[in-house]
């Protein structure tokens, strides 16, 4: 009978899910007196603890690089690797003019083509970023390496382990392509350039760290592509063939400086070629510069640059975050809990599902409220981390598939909310009744099946102990910092399109922890309705 009654909990929570947070009676006074259903509110204790994230699934087009040391959490370093995309059936001949040559058209000398020669005049790697965390004037140094053959072997991993932030990026480090000192804010750029805009008022300046590469790298790529055009290889059929055979990608790391994390938007491989200025007949123009003997100078030549391969969403980009041992020390604090990004700390809460079932199995759940309150951050550091803006509350056992399958919150076993920093410093979830009922019904279904199999030998106490041992996370949820992507529909409705781990620095210290070691239990507020007793 209890299992049947509890099955109504889910439907009821659907009906009452939109009720106002402060409403207890839920409008039951509108029913006839003889059919009155009484609404009640009661509370249950919730125990929380910090758990170390270790590694998180991070499918993102942003690369993070740098090092930052916090006085409380210690240091963490960020590095990333990225492949460069190659468009299908790429040919240099389709983007470059022919090599310049002169010919006679009757009595008229003409020219065709503008390319000085079939060679690469230079090649550089451009690391673009549009934002950063920390000290913008902190002196740093970036090193860029080409990925090695080990990456080619493992990039086809079906389990996509490279998507997790504990990826060993050093394992894929090949030859050094370049090193560059930088500050996030490049003071050498004049304001006229930094503040320049296009015709639409959009800024044209894009912060970038540029690496001049060995020209031979570009020459090798050009030569392989010419062979491709002759049908001698398939290396430029698509991005996979290009990465496996031509240019595997780059590994970007910080090897000097502490206090700045760059958010890299794009990495480009830019080629430089030499071209002739030509006149109306296609003939190379001459420089109007005289030497000491009055002779006219050489042909007028200019350099043109073009990005031919770049990091995009179609190819793999992987981030690594490595934290110091001080992070573990913060996890072990029992007087409170933490959430910390990126790939730092989550807060785990054990929902009192057994107690709710035992006390309210004959009633109907309407609303279940859970609130995490964070302590005010009194850190006076110039570049201190703020509280994560958005968080996800999700069953612990569902976390892996949620992020790997790019799911969004379903308000059944996963919920999102925004930090209320202006009033009460809280992450408030007004109704997680569906999550609670899902947990309870899951256990009840297992209980019913086990009892049927056991028959007369059924022992409720033994089964319950065994269930909890085999399913330690059945009633556990995690509070996780996330970044939420939304978009407007044609009907002007805002819908969530993506929920991903927050990879930017942030933390919140939350009330909770172990009550036996100075912590305190959180309160789960449950609103339920009771039917009249005969």
Image (spheres, grey):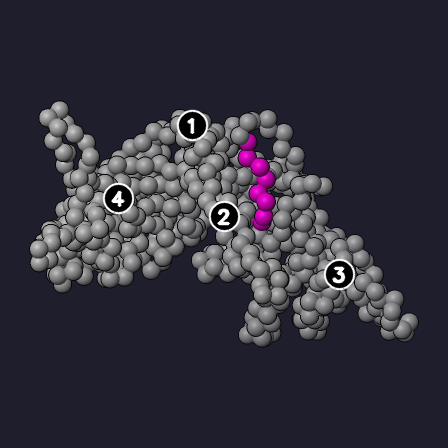
Query: Measured along the vertical axis of the image, is residue 37 above or below residue 71?
Result: below
Magenta stretch, main secondary structure class: loop
Q: Residues within 10 Å of mark 2 (few under 14, many from 20)?
A: few
Q: Are marks 3 and 4 in contact (CB under 8 Å)?
A: no
Say which residue label 1 marks: 187
Which of the marked residues, 3 or 4, is nearer the chain's N terminus?
3
Pick whichever, 65 or 530, lies toward us: 65
**Residue at 57% across, 52% down:** 392
The x, y position of residue 362, in whole percent, is 75, 68
Instruction: Work out how far the residue at label 3 is from the one at label 4, CA to CA, in angstroms.
Output: 64 Å
* Real-space Cα separation, disc 4 to disc 2, in angstroms: 26 Å
Residue 396 in view: no
Determine if residue 356 is in view: yes
Q: Single out the mark in the foreground, 3 or 4.
A: 4
**Among the two numbered marks 1 and 4 on one chain, the one whose residue lies closer to the N terminus:** 1
Q: Magenta stretch?
A: 384-391
Q: Report the mark closest to the observer, 1 or 4.
A: 4
């Amino acid at each position: 009978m209890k299992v049947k009654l509890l099955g109504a909990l889910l439907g009821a929570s659907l009906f009452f899910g939109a009720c106002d947070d402060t409403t207890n009676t839920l409008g039951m006074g509108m029913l006839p007196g003889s059919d009155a259903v009484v609404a009640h509110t009661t509370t249950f204790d919730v125990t929380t603890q910090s758990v170390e994230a270790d590694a998180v699934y991070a499918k993102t087009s942003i690369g993070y690089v740098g090092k930052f040391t916090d006085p409380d959490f210690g240091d963490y370093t960020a590095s990333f690797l990225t492949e460069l995309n190659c468009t299908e059936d790429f040919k240099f001949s389709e983007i470059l003019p022919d090599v310049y040559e002169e010919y006679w058209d009757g009595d008229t000398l003409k020219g065709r083509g503008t390319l000085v020669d079939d060679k690469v005049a230079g090649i550089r790697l451009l690391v673009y970023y549009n934002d950063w965390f920390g000290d913008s004037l902190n002196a740093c140094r970036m090193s860029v390496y080409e990925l090695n053959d080990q990456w080619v072997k493992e990039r086809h991993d079906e389990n996509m382990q490279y998507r997790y932030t504990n990826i060993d990026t050093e394992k894929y480090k090949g030859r050094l392509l370049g090193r560059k000192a930088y500050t996030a804010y490049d003071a050498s750029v004049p304001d006229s350039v930094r503040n320049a805009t296009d015709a639409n008022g959009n800024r044209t300046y894009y912060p970038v760290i540029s690496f001049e590469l060995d020209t031979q790298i570009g020459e090798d790529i050009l030569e392989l592509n010419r062979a491709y055009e002759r049908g001698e290889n398939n290396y430029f059929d698509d991005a996979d063939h290009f990465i496996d055979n031509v240019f595997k990608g780059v590994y970007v790391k910080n090897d000097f400086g502490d206090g700045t994390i760059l958010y890299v938007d794009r990495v480009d491989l830019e080629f430089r070629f030499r071209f002739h200025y030509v006149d109306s007949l296609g003939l190379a123009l001459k420089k109007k510069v005289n030497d000491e003997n009055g002779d006219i100078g050489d042909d007028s030549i200019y350099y043109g640059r073009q990005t031919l391969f770049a990091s995009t969403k179609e190819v793999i980009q992987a981030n690594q975050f490595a934290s110091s041992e001080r992070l573990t020390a913060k996890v072990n604090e029992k007087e409170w809990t933490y959430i910390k990004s990126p790939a730092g700390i989550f807060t785990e809460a054990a929902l009192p599902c057994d107690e709710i079932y035992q006390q309210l199995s004959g009633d109907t759940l309407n609303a279940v409220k859970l609130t995490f309150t964070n302590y005010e951050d009194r850190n006076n550091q110039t570049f201190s981390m703020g509280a994560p803006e958005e968080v996800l509350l999700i069953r612990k056992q569902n976390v892996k598939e949620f992020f790997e399958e790019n799911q969004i919150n379903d308000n059944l076993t996963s919920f999102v909310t925004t930090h209320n920093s202006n009033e009460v410093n809280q992450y408030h979830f007004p109704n997680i009744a569906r999550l609670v009922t899902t947990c309870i019904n899951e256990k009840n279904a297992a209980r019913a099946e086990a009892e049927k199999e056991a028959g007369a030998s059924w022992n409720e106490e033994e089964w319950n102990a065994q269930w909890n041992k085999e399913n330690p996370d059945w009633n556990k949820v995690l509070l996780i910092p996330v970044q939420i992507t939304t978009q407007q529909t044609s009907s002007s409705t805002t819908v969530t399109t993506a929920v991903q781990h927050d990879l930017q620095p942030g933390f919140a210290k939350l009330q909770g922890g172990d009550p036996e070691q100075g912590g305190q239990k959180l309160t789960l507020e449950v609103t339920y309705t009771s039917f009249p007793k005969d």
